Amino acid sequence: MEDLKKQEVYKLLNKAIDEYKRENYEIAIVYLDDALQLDPHNAEVHYWRGKVATLDLNDEVIENAIADFSEAVNLKPDYWEAYFERGKVYLYFDRLEDAENDFLKVIELNPRFKDVYSYLAQIEIQRGNDDKAMEYLNKVGGGGDYKYYFNLGKIFFNAKSYKSAIENFTKALEDNKYLVDAYYFRAKSYEAIGEYKKAITDFKNATILMPEEKKFFTEMAKVFFKMAEDELKKNGDILKSADYFIEGLTIDYNLKIDPKYEDVFQKAAKICMENKEFRRALEYLEFEDRVLENTFVEGNLDYETYQRKKSIINSLMKEAERGLPLKERIKKKLYDLYLR
């Protein structure tokens, strides 16, 4: 009878593993729960329950994985895979000392398993110990999976060796195109060496993968501002610079334009009016107006200066409106009335 129960447990466990591989995690957990009811002291069942839990998007569920991995090693003290997986969960929650202890236990139980050194390197990077991190990475064997290249990229990034950092983040992304942090740090590396368009592309990739992370949007907006300032300094292209500032402000309206560049929209509008591009001129003036309003509301402008600048903008807007075709002027008037 006991043998039959054991067979049923492993039958359920194998079904769960198959569903896990097919990414049917909800079905997998049902099989694992059934197996656990039959044998609550089966280390492998606890291990796989933990594996499934780590793939949840809810931190509370992920934290539950620690309990299952802990039970797995209690039942099977040489279960190095469970120590490894628990270490990764600890690392996810920034419990560095707990993670380090588990990873060192993995080395004790299975010294041939090289992947663990990449995670130990990651811990040392977070502690700011780049030399120690490099020691661990060298034990991977001069190359490895995406974790190895990502961590090596972080070391070069911290050392301000941005081109080497980019090379390693690129290798990491070739192996794992969903590695959000690699896109982020490669973007910061590109930004540091002035390759702004490549930085923008990587920030966009990061936002696609993790749209809830506001930092990616803010950093991308700042790069557009750098592009705008760079354009003015190197080429003096006011229109292109104004467009870059607008790109940045569209992403993050809280960013502040340096006072020495704050008249860029007005200059761009005047150029457009000279070229009879009145619609485009109005777009620039509307942005200047919004920036002026924000500056005043935040208390960074006295009332007299605000009124003077407002008057200039309104005068230029009227001039631009007069250049629009009649139908567009009517639409603009109606739109302005509606906003009031």
Image (cartoon, rainbow, N blue to C red):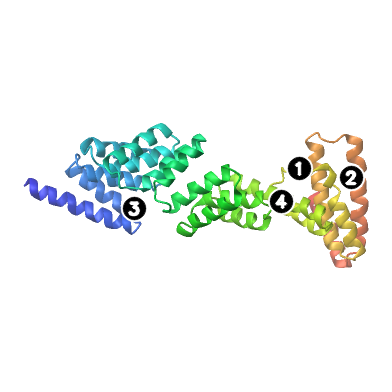
Closer-to-camera residue (5/167):
167
Residue shown at 49% from the left, 52% from the top: 179
Residue shown at 38% from the left, 35% from the top: 100
Distance, label 1 to label 4, CA atoms, is: 10 Å
Can residue 334 be seen here? The reply is no
Do residues under tags 1 and 4 come within 8 Å of each other at their CB atoms? no
The type of residue carrying mark 4 is Gly
The type of residue carrying mark 3 is Tyr
Q: Is tag 2's residue or tag 1's residue first in the polypeptide sequence?
A: 1
Direction from residue 24 to residue 292 in the image, left or right = right
Distance, label 1 to label 3, CA atoms, is: 46 Å
Residue that carries the numbered disc 4 in the rendered image: 248
> Is residue 76 placed above or below 190 in the rendered structure?
above
Mark 4: secondary structure: helix
Mark 1: secondary structure: loop
Residue that carries the numbered disc 2 in the rendered image: 310
Direction from residue 23 to residue 121 in the image, left or right = right
Distance, label 4 to label 3, CA atoms, is: 40 Å
Distance, label 4 to label 2, CA atoms, is: 23 Å
The type of residue carrying mark 2 is Lys
x, y percent for residue 39: 17, 42
